[in-house]
Amino acid sequence: MLESLRYAEQQAMTQLKMEPEVYERQDYYRFNQILLAKSAEEREQDVGALFGAVGANTPGALIN
């Protein structure tokens, strides 16, 4: 856990050019949510949307 906190601080300093004092004043939970955010492509997809993307919910489509 402590190593994860150190890594998050390192990423904030190197990627976001944030000073250690600024990082330490931030709300930890909110800041961690921001650092862990994923792009739309990296997020899990809804199964229904996945079937729709391959045409499985069109009339007459067979699901085995």
Image (cartoon, rainbow, N blue to C red):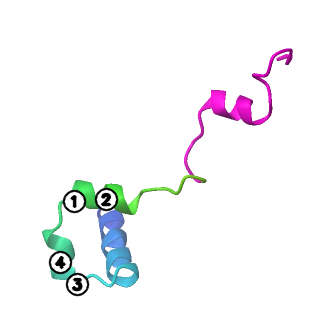
Quarter of the rendering occupied by the C terminus? top right
Q: CA distance from mark 4 to mark 1?
A: 12 Å
Instruction: Determine which residue is flagged by label 1.
Output: 28
Q: CA distance from mark 2 to mark 4?
A: 14 Å
Q: Answer yes or no: do the residues labelled 1 and 2 have beta carbons within 8 Å?
A: yes
Q: Position of residue 44 (x, y in %)?
A: 57, 42
**On the rendered structure, is 5 left or right of 42?**
left
Sequence-first tag of 3 and 1 = 3
Dot 3: few (<14), some (14–19), or many (≥20) neighbours within 10 Å? Answer: few
Displayed quadrant of residue 23: bottom left
Instruction: Determine which residue is flagged by label 2.
Output: 32
Q: Position of residue 30 (x, y in %)?
A: 25, 56
Near-viewer residue (57 or 9): 57
Sequence-first tag of 2 and 4 = 4
Q: Is residue 57 magenta?
A: yes
Dot 2: few (<14), some (14–19), or many (≥20) neighbours within 10 Å? Answer: some
First to last magenta residue range: 42-64
Near-viewer residue (24 or 2): 24
Looking at the image, which residue sits at the far front? 59
Q: Is residue 7 above or below residue 62?
A: below
Residue type for callout 4: Val
Sequence-first tag of 2 and 3 = 3
Dot 1: few (<14), some (14–19), or many (≥20) neighbours within 10 Å? Answer: few
